[in-house]
Image (tube, rainbow, N blue to C red):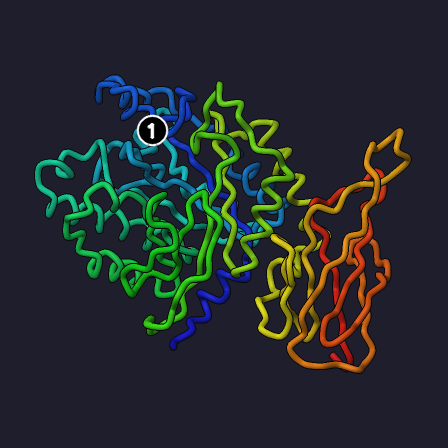
Amino acid sequence: MIINQYIRDFENLGLGMFVHFGLYSILGRGEWVRSLENIPAEEYESLTDRFDPKEGWAEELAENAKNAGCGYITLTARHHDGFSLYDTCGLTDFDAPHALCGRDIVKEFVDACNKRGLKPFFYHTLLDWHEQTYRTDFKAYLKYLRKSIGVLCKNYGKIGGIWFDGMWDRPGEDWEEDALYATIREFQPEAMIINNTGLDARGALGHIELDSVTFERGNPKPINLESSPKYIASEMCEVMNDCWGIGFNDLNYKSPAMLIEEMVLCRRTRANFLMNTGPRPDGSLRTVDRGIFELIGRWMEKFGDIFRYAVPTSQAAVLEKEKDFILEKDGKFYLFCFGLPTVADPNVSGRVWADYDVRIKLKEPTTGRIAVTAIDTGESLPYDLEDGILTVHGTPFKFGSNLVVRVIEITIGGK
C-alpha cells in the first residue's frame, strides 16, 4: 500500500476550521437560503451589490483559527449558489471582484493563512444554481468547473487541498472525475483531494485520487483499506448549531463540552475534526463562535501535541469504557478519559466523587517500572497491574478546572 507523506501530514494537522461565507451570509438564513426559499435568481444575485467584507476580516479569522490550535482552514471559495470568492479570471462575472468589495477574497484568505503557518484549503461546489450549463449542457459545465479549479490551483501558491461537495446532486451522471482530479494534480500534486459523500454515505471510499473520506456530522468509523492501493485519511466536519452559513436566528448551539468530546473522539480512528463557523456579512465571527474556538484552544494548549501526533495502537486497549481510548506516541501510551467530574465541597459543586477506574489490556507482559501521569496537572496517578491488565485510578478535576477530556500519559518499562 502506498502511503503518501502529504496525507500523513494532513492527519497530523488534526484540527481545522471550516468557513461558510458568501452572499447567503448577507441574508443570515443559512447557506441554502436561495434554494429553500425559492428566491428568484435576479433578486438573489443582486446581493453582490451589498457584498463587502471589511478590511482585515481574513486576518481576524486566521488569528482565531491559530489560537484554537487549528492547522488548516477550509473556505467556501464557491458554494452551491455559484458565487465565487475568488477572481475567476473571466470565466464569470459572478465573483467577488465584480461585487461591491471589488476584491479577491480568496487571496486575502490565503495571505492570512500563510502568514500564520496555516494551510489554506478550498471548498468548491460541484453543483451550481447559477451557471446555466449545469442544467442545459452538463459536458460544457464540467469544462467550466475544471477551468474554475485550474484558476484556484494556479493563482494562489501552494494550497493544502480542495474539498468538493455536491456530486450527490446528480448521482447517475459521469462527472469526469479523472479529468477533474488531473487538473489538481497537474498544478498541486501534493494537495489533498476530498469529495464529500454527504449524510447518507459517511466514510464511503471513491475515486482512487481521493485522499480522505468524509463523515459529515457523524462519528468517524475505521475504514476498510484492504482493497485500496494507497492509504486514505478521514475527516469529520461539524457545525456549531444547525446552519453552516450564518443564521441570525439560529440559536441552537451545541455546548463547547460536546464539541470538544466530538473533536477528541475523532482521533480514536485518526480522523481530523473540521469545526465550522459562519461569519457575519462583514467577515467577522459571532462572539459565541469566537468563544467556542477559544475554549477549544484552551484544551489544545494542554493536549494539542498528543492530539495531533499520537496514533492508534495495537499494543494496548481500553476495556469496558464506552468512550475512553488509548493512543501511542514515541513509545508512550496516552489514555483519553471522558466524564471526569469537578469535585469540591458538596455545597459548591453538588457532585460527589466516585471511583473512576480504567482497565487497559496490555498486549505484551511487563514487569518493568510504570509511570502514570495526568498531563494537565503533572500529578502521578495510582494504578494496579494484574494478569496483563493495567488499572488506572483516575482523579477528578479540581474546582475551577474541567477540561472535559483528560489525557493521561503511561510510561511502561524502558519505553
Could you say where residue 191 lies in the image, as x and y percent from the top left? 39, 60
Q: Which residue is drawn at 13% across and 38% down?
A: 133
Residue name at image x 41 percent, y 26 percent: 25
Front one among 240 and 147: 240
Q: Name the residue under label 1.
A: 32
Please tell me whether residue 182 is drawn above or below residue 44 in the rendered image. below
Relative horizontal placement of residue 247, taking residue 133 as reference (left or right):
right
In this view, the residue farthest toward the left is 137
In the image, residue 283 above or below residue 263: above
Question: Left or right of 50: which side holds 306?
Answer: right
Say above or below: 86 vs 55.
below
Report x, y in % for residue 107.
Answer: 42, 43
Task: Provide residue 57's location: percent of width, then percent of height.
Answer: 52, 33
Q: In which quarter of the image is residue 40?
A: top left
Q: Which residue is drawn at 77% across and 58% down?
A: 375
Q: In which quarter of the image is the C terminus?
A: bottom right
Quarter placement of the N terminus? bottom left
Mark 1: which amino acid?
Trp
- Toward the viewer: 347 or 174? 347
